[in-house]
Amino acid sequence: MFKKAIEAKSHQRLSGADRKKLKRTIRDRFPRASDADIDALLPPKAEITVSKFVNRVHLYGVEGSFPMFFDVDGRGSEIFPTVFALWKVPEMLPSFILKGGEVSQFIIGGADLMFPGINIPTEGLPSFLAGEPWAVKVPGNPSPIAVGSTTMSTAEALKAGMRGKALRITHYYRDLLWESVEGHYVPNAGFLEDVVFEDPVLLSSVHVPDSCEGSGDSSNHENDGADSKEVGGSAISDSHPTSKTQLDSDIVEQVTTVVGCIKVTDNIASDESTTVVEEQHTLSAEDVDAYLDKCLLQALHTTVNDKDLPMPGSTLWSNHVLPCRPSGITLDIKKSSHKKLSKWLQAKSSAGLISVKEDKYKKETVLFSVNRRHLDYLSFKPERRQEQKVDKGGDQAVKETRSPKLLEVSEIYKPSVHVNPIFASVGADTGKLYSALEASDVVFKYIEKGNLVKPMSKSTVVLDPTLCDALFKGAIKKGSAYPTEIHKKDLGSTFVSRMQAHHIVTRGSESVVRKGSVRTIQIVTERRQGNKKVTKLSGMETFLLDADALASELQKKFACSTSVTELPGKKGHEVLIQGGVIDDVARHLVEQYGVPKRYIEILDKTKK
């Protein structure tokens, strides 16, 4: 629904009669919401606005605040709450609980919810009809991540063997609706950039032992989390509008502790969990600092490879530092003397152990290099840790068994004739390939060198002739005036768009650099010879997959015949699979070979 940017064709305030009609429609469609809930979302004395789009979608919200509801066809029959509304009133809709936080990455990536990804309660599948609005939640997190409509009833789902699509997603966290809202935020620290896990606040509360049991008894946690979430939401939107940037910054810092908080309480008895929480509170700032330094050095020796750099600070923290902490210890950066992840990394950079820079566009500290000749690095002896043979769940086990096949796709850029003068001015190599972050650093160095920041507005850059040509020459229609200034937040992306796109694909020890953007994998299902279905797969060579080997593997996995043919007039091959296994093939490519979902195009020609 909100996967592509669409401009609103009109904005207007609702009249009194239309306000009453809207509230009646919401009350009828969402019987679980009380009058107080609806008034909390659409306050009686606040101005309600509606934005109308060319695709017939109507977006309703409070003027000066967040959008709360959207109407799919503008007729009032398919109204859904936005995630901002669900974060204030999480029980407005019934919710499907995912099997684990890892599954959320597919929803955030734009996929619909499939039945195999749902955690079925012990009492059985809840009752629902086709076309009903439902939300999606992660176990241990009270805030929904998506909303959509059911594709079939409970009876039909059971008859289908709990396979197929459960929920057609219409809106989700991090889609363009969420992205386009000024001051968008996350309800708790469990919401990461591309995945959502448990809320660490709930995990560290006195209810920690219960939260580790899964989603079977989640009502208490949802009620507890709703209060704190509403407070956070209202504080951002109403009470302290001027401090929103600082609050968002604090949320980013809290996000970095999520993975550690989740893993500490796994497979620990109730009494032991309480002990862990109490121990964390007894650690002094000096103790936390010592653990941080030890974990960082352990990570730099064991898991942080130079080929993975540059690396966002949040990734370094959650994927490398936290997994190296001693058993039974919960690391909280806020309890250290540094208080924030960025300040800690800057301190390590000042000591010469690592080199970090701030991504001025994303406002995040990024690890660029490791000084492996530093005295602290050389004197540290990393611990050899045995792998814990603990039942980590099916998804975790799959990830560990397929680690040798993990894929890395990086988009890089080469300076073009448009931007070469900027690179030459700061002494940067015009024949080198740059990441988007590195390219942005080049243009910001040029700005600093030329002192082009507007004195009265630090967020605005004044364009000199060289920078103006680099950004807009040839892109402005003849007769139109060239811009004289640009906002800093638009500068990096505009500059990168003027460079030549390349990409690097790495699988194991094999790595390939290609020109242009990443080409997608195409999976198409169509009918042949009456009602017989076939699935065609092409473009796998982009991600260093051999067509013949993949065809043989799919033949065994799906117990069907496969064949490989060379595409006419194109480079590459096409794998033909007997049967309509379009979703299964896509899932296999994501789970087994790590192909990002955004690089897979699916077309089912058998559906009208």
Image (spheres, rainbow, N blue to C red):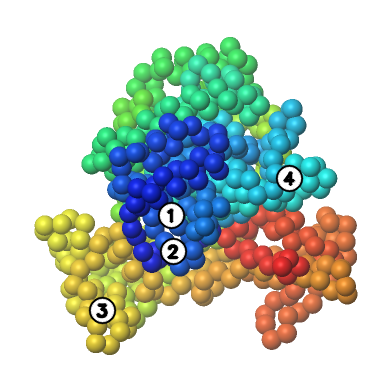
Residue 550 is labelled as none
Labels 2 & 3 near each other (Cβ < 8 A) = no
SS label for mark 4: loop
| Of marks 3 and 1, the one in the foreground | 1
Question: Where 571 falls versus 325 (above or below)?
Answer: below
Labels 2 & 1 near each other (Cβ < 8 A) = yes
**Can see residue 187?**
no
| Residue density around tag 3, few if under 14, some if 14–19, many if 20 or more, within 10 Å | some
Mark closest to the chain's N terminus, 2 or 1: 2
SS label for mark 3: helix
Residue 53 is labelled as 2
> What separation in Å lies between label 3 and label 4 (alpha carbons)?
58 Å
Q: Amino acid at mark 4?
A: Ser
Along the viewing direction, whichever of 7 and 129 lies nearer the viewer: 129
> What separation in Å lies between label 2 and label 3 (alpha carbons)?
34 Å
Q: Position of residue 273 (x, y in %)?
A: 56, 17
Along the viewing direction, whichever of 234 and 299 lies nearer the viewer: 234
| Residue density around tag 2, few if under 14, some if 14–19, many if 20 or more, within 10 Å | some
Mark closest to the chain's N terminus, 3 or 4: 4
Q: Amino acid at mark 1?
A: Leu
Residue 59 is labelled as 1
Mark closest to the chain's N terminus, 2 or 3: 2
| Residue density around tag 4, few if under 14, some if 14–19, many if 20 or more, within 10 Å | some
| Point 58% across, 12% down: residue | 271
Q: Amino acid at mark 3?
A: Asp
| Point 73% across, 35% down: residue | 125
| Of marks 3 and 4, the one in the foreground | 4
Q: Mark 3 highlights which residue?
A: 469
